[in-house]
Image (spheres, rainbow, N blue to C red):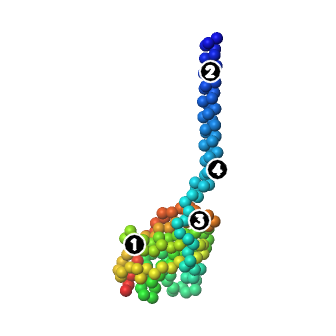
């Protein structure tokens, strides 16, 4: 009789352990399902929508003048001087995210954009902040959700050689 009671107690203990493990696994699963959207979008923008952005007003496709030359960040080598001192930080109109740009020279941030809306651009005057000569700019590009301003991806790097003539 004593052995039968011990067997029943052992079966009950094993059943309770298995039941606790199942409840714990179900609880973790529910937590992950409910919490996942918050985890995915938990890092919000550390900057505001740019108050200096404007509509894209440069001839990106050279439709108006085939001999025009537009300086765009990240494409080819830029030559900047007193007459053409700006780099255009552009978020194409077909994007569905905000973009932000940190522009670096020699591991130092020389310009930090706000959040740029699709179809908008921000200009910055490189000529005024760098000396004459050749430089390598590094653009650190991040994207943010239009509604929540949560970071979707960051850390994209684009290098560009520039020549500043003074």
**Residue 65 visible here:** yes
Query: What residue is pinned by disc 4?
Result: 34
Q: Is residue 17 above or below residue 5?
A: below
Q: What element carries label 1?
A: strand
N-terminal-most mark, 4 or 2: 2
- Of all residues, the one furthest to the top in this rendering is 1
Q: What element carries label 2?
A: helix
Quadrant of res 138? bottom left
Tell me whether circle 4 and circle 2 mark residues in contact (CB < 8 Å): no
Q: Is residue 3 above or below residue 27?
A: above
Label 4 vs label 2, nearer the camera: 2
N-terminal-most mark, 3 or 4: 4
Residue 140 spot, x, y in % from top left: 47, 68
Considering depth in this image, is 109 or 48 the residue closer to the camera?
48
Q: Residue at x 48, y 63 (%)?
A: 155
**Residue 163 visible here:** no
Residue 116 spot, x, y in % from top left: 56, 73
Query: What residue is pinned by disc 3?
Result: 149
* Marks 3 and 2, how far apart at CA: 56 Å
* Marks 4 and 2, how far apart at CA: 37 Å
Query: What residue is pinned by disc 1?
Result: 105
Classify 10 Å Cα crowding around label 2: few (below 14), some (14-19), many (20 and above). few
Label 1 vs label 2, nearer the camera: 2
Label 3 vs label 1, nearer the camera: 3
N-terminal-most mark, 3 or 1: 1
Q: Is mark 4 on a helix, strand or loop?
A: helix
Classify 10 Å Cα crowding around label 4: few (below 14), some (14-19), many (20 and above). few
N-terminal-most mark, 3 or 2: 2
Considering depth in this image, is 72 or 19 the residue closer to the camera?
19
Query: What residue is pinned by disc 2?
Result: 9
Q: Which residue is drawn at 63% across and 37% down?
A: 23
Considering depth in this image, is 63 or 5 the residue closer to the camera?
5
């Amino acid at each position: 009789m004593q052995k039968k009671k011990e067997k029943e107690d052992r079966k009950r203990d094993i059943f309770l352990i298995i039941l606790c493990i199942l409840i714990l696994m179900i609880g973790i699963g529910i937590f992950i399902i409910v919490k996942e959207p918050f985890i995915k979008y938990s890092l919000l923008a550390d900057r505001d929508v740019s108050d200096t952005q404007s509509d894209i007003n440069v001839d990106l496709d050279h439709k108006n003048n085939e001999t025009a030359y537009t300086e765009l960040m990240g494409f080819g080598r830029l030559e900047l001087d007193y007459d053409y001192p700006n780099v255009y930080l552009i978020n194409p109109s077909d994007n569905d995210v905000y973009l932000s740009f940190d522009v670096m020279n020699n591991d130092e941030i020389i310009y930090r954009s706000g959040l740029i809306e699709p179809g908008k651009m921000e200009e910055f005057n490189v000529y005024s902040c760098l000396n004459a000569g050749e430089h390598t700019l590094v653009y650190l590009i991040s994207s943010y959700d239009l509604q929540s301003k949560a970071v979707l991806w960051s850390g994209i790097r684009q290098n560009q050689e520039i020549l500043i003539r003074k």
